[in-house]
Amino acid sequence: MEKSKLKKDIVVVYAIALIGLIATLAVYVKHLTPEWKKYQSEFKQYVREKLGEDKARMVEFGVRQIYVKELNRVDRCITCHIGYEWKGLENASNPFKTHPKEILDKHPVQKYGCTICHGGQGYALNKEEAHGFIKHWDEPLLGKELEDIYRPPDRKVLLQMNCNICHRYDTLTPGADYINYAKKLVREKGCRACHKINGRGGVIGPDLTYEGDKAPEQFDYSRIGGYKSVFAWHIAHFKNPKMVSPESIMPEMGFGSREAIALTLLTMSWRKVNLPPEYIPQSSKALADLPTPEEIEKERQMREGEGAFFVNKGCFVCHSISVFGIESAAKIGPDLSNAVEDVQSRFGKTLENFIKEPTGTMAIVLGSQIILSDSEKAQVVELLTKAYEKYRKQQLTSKP
Amino acid sequence: MKFDRRKFLKNFGIGALLLTLVGQIYTWIRSLFPNVSYEGIKRVKIDEPDKIPDGVTFIDDIKTYIFREGKTFYAISGVCTHLGCTVKYVGLSKPKVVKIGGKEVEVKWEFHCPCHGSKFYGDGTNYAGPAPRPLDWVKVEVSPEDGKLVVDFSKKVSQNYKLTV
Amino acid sequence: MAEVKVNGKKLVKRSLFWTWAPRSEKEAGDSIVRNLLLHWFPAKVTLKSLSWGYSLWLGTITATLFLILTLTGVVLMFLYVPSVERAYQSVKDIEYVVSFGWFIRAMHRNSAHLMVAFVFLHMVRVFLTGAYKNGVGAGQNRPLNWIVGVVLLLITLLLSFTGYLLPWDQLAFWAITVGTNIAKNAPIVGEWIRFVLLGGYEIEQNALIRFYVLHCFFLPAAVLVLFSYHMWRIRKDGGLACVDNLVLNQKKEKITDGIKSKTYSLLGLTTGRTVQVEATLIDEEKYTVNSIPFLIRRIGIVMLGTFVFVALISLFIHAPLEEPANPNVTPNPAKAPWYFLWLQELVAITTIRIGGFVINGAFVGGILIPGILVALLAIWPYLDKSSNLSTGVWFSKERTKQNIIFLILCFFVIVLIIIGTYMRGPNWEFYFPWEAWPQLPKKF
């Protein structure tokens, strides 16, 4: 190497310094022109036009955040959604619009923040990441973007899901009609016959108490077309359980998209969230999501009546046995009152043989869900024969 | 001519180098000045003015006493001007008349500091102990957003700043 | 002091770096040791050592990266909260609301990755030039310095690894889960090491604070100590290995014993028996230049260049942050940082089954193979029997065979890293780079 070359080193130093200066300037440009500054100056301009110079002067620049210590949440949404508390901007478009007042009166922003209801990433300071439709963020904004994917029959219903984080044990939550509807369906369709919900219910299906905490990886999407998500899985599954998971014995209830979305919102709201007591509405009595007296009485009758065996074994989930006063919630199987005759005509074998060697759906059910011992099988035949006698008698008496 | 260009390049190079270094080091220093605060709220929205009780109310979050006299509101900081302890409100069983700034004023309560014994009259004027100056008065305003009374601890106002609604 | 007091200005400038001014040549020689810069660097340096092509300046780049990491790391220490509840949030804050936080964190993260790469490249360079071999100086012990280098490589990996946990996101949590479970498979001490490292059996607050202290104090301190020794040894070993080669070529004679030599300085010479290269060579103006300004300037270029490069890429490559750590859900695929992916690949394919007898791949791939490789690296200089003519020469003919073996090993590691990085999809299944991964489900 020549010495003369070394002398030229100084030029290299300057050249690198120049590149360094450009890089440094780029950092500063990025620092000085964040997205939120644009929104804030637009807001100031907007207020000046709408409400006058005096009010515009009250708009201060800077990052704003709501820190809710109790919920361990930091929400910076109000940096851009700056007009959320302003009077007179009710008709403005987002992000400057005034937040509806009634709901904020009951849920003060300082105590709740934004994302606990709306979803989204409160940390972020740019639209894309704050609205949360990005990799590595699980709680996107429950708003328009999501509506465009799932198309619920009504608008602005998706965020009702988060109402139910606190209002989980309410029977009726004012304003959350989808959640209320879903809770009504849960009662009417007797989901608890198979599933544990809020810690109470049957054991035939999976416990749903914390179903909303399940990770996307825990579902099988192989039979779902289009966009793959837990939300989409639940909707498809509610509409047609067998199609989504063939081995499932969950009955098809004939739900439309309104029912499916309402139930999906409810199911996904069942999450384990540590809430300080003051965030839980109503008195502690409401906490248990207890059954009504009528429900208790009906259940008692079913459990202690003639058909108690079928209730305890879980047969009543699909089958009614009207002569024993057992009414199935789902009614997907035939009434077993006339099983003795019905089995013969459907499967071409006697009830006794069918119970020993079932075919079709019952083969799956009796093979995996409801396991009967030989003596129990005999009991089934005996009881159903008794039911058939009763059924015949009824038939005869009812006929003139 | 050639000499000048060289000199220019040299100065330019050294300038770029220094600017880069200063610019980079400044990022480190600037990052240590927080842009958001996780501390208690300095601006507290209380309630509609007519729902605030007459007399004195202590607002924990910002260590401030707020007073209502009919339609007039004012707030005095409870932070001792000596070394920052929180002063105690002491109601006097018998009002006393004292001279503050040459004027005779009736005093119904006082503030006493537990740390070093400073004492203040009801309007915040210091009269005993090490406190160097009167207690701060804090701005009371009506929120432009929803008409509720707001106490902004970060805004100090002159003594006797009172808000009449 | 009186001698230096020529004018006021000089005194101020000098008194910062010089505590004393020489009155004789002996004193002048001694003074070298007292000068901050000349204590690290020789007074004169050969042109070969200064050239870009011999050393590629990889060590200097690595040291610069460490400096960047220290500076940005100290800043981040002010901003980061090492607690399970606050860690993730504080990193999000660094990304979003701390002024320049995203940039400082990106600098830190990118430097960390580059440092791992450059320590490795530095090692490859030293190997291929046979620079771990002693040359002609008395008291040289380059093999020892090579071992110090290997230890520094390991500490660098540990530094990166401990830094990984701190953001407390999914990436962090599962990388540490896999990493510490590999440690568990070390014979006898494995369980114990994991227990001490995590302060328990689960990755929880105890683990976080331990990794934090290791990352911010113990490991950097160890690097500093070893790096100082590394640099000091270079001086004591007579500078870069290429200098020995220069001497040998010039002399064209076999030297069996070390040469008694002299230490030179800008100020004069002092007689002694410290290790240095042949006086005649260094004296020749043709081969050497003064360290100040030439060596200092080149070091300046490399440091500045490294810094600017890191700053430049940090504008575009931001440090990632995944979902908050969730012990119940393993992301798919869960990948270790790239420099450990070759190990992850090994761990995944080396479980050995002979009849009912099973050896966990975590032991074979995670402990045994890397253990053998590190041990081999450490003792290699003692196995290398080539003559000292191969010291400090790129691709010496004498060492062709061992260079090829070394390169093949490096090649395997790199290939495994590339496979792990680009060709492993969900469930660690193999995908060619042009094959799309199945769409991963989201919550919404």
Image: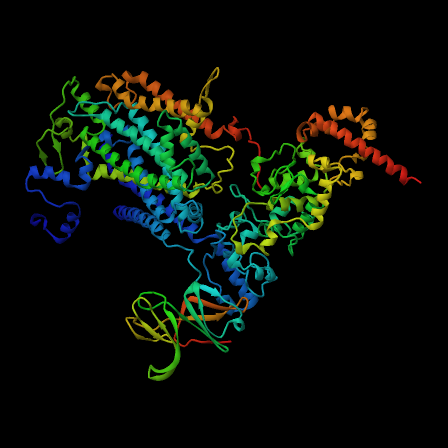
Quarter of the rendering containing residue B57: bottom left
Q: Is residue A50 left or right of residue B42?
A: right
Residue B3 drawn above or below residue B101: above
Q: Position of residue C164 (x, y in %)?
A: 40, 38
Residue C399 drawn above or below residue A174: above
Q: Nearer the viewer, residue A245 or C195?
A: C195
Residue C354 drawn above or below residue A176: above
Identify the residue at image location x=79%, y=34%. Answer: A336
Quarter of the rendering containing residue B134: bottom left
Total labels: the figure holds 0
Q: Residue furthest left?
A: C24
Q: Nearer the viewer, residue C358 or B96?
A: B96
Q: Position of residue A237 (x, y in %)?
A: 67, 38
Q: Position of residue C165 (x, y in %)?
A: 41, 39
Quadrant where the C terminus of chain C sits is top right
Q: Is residue A380 left or right of residue A140?
A: right
Q: Nearer the viewer, residue C53 or A392?
A: A392
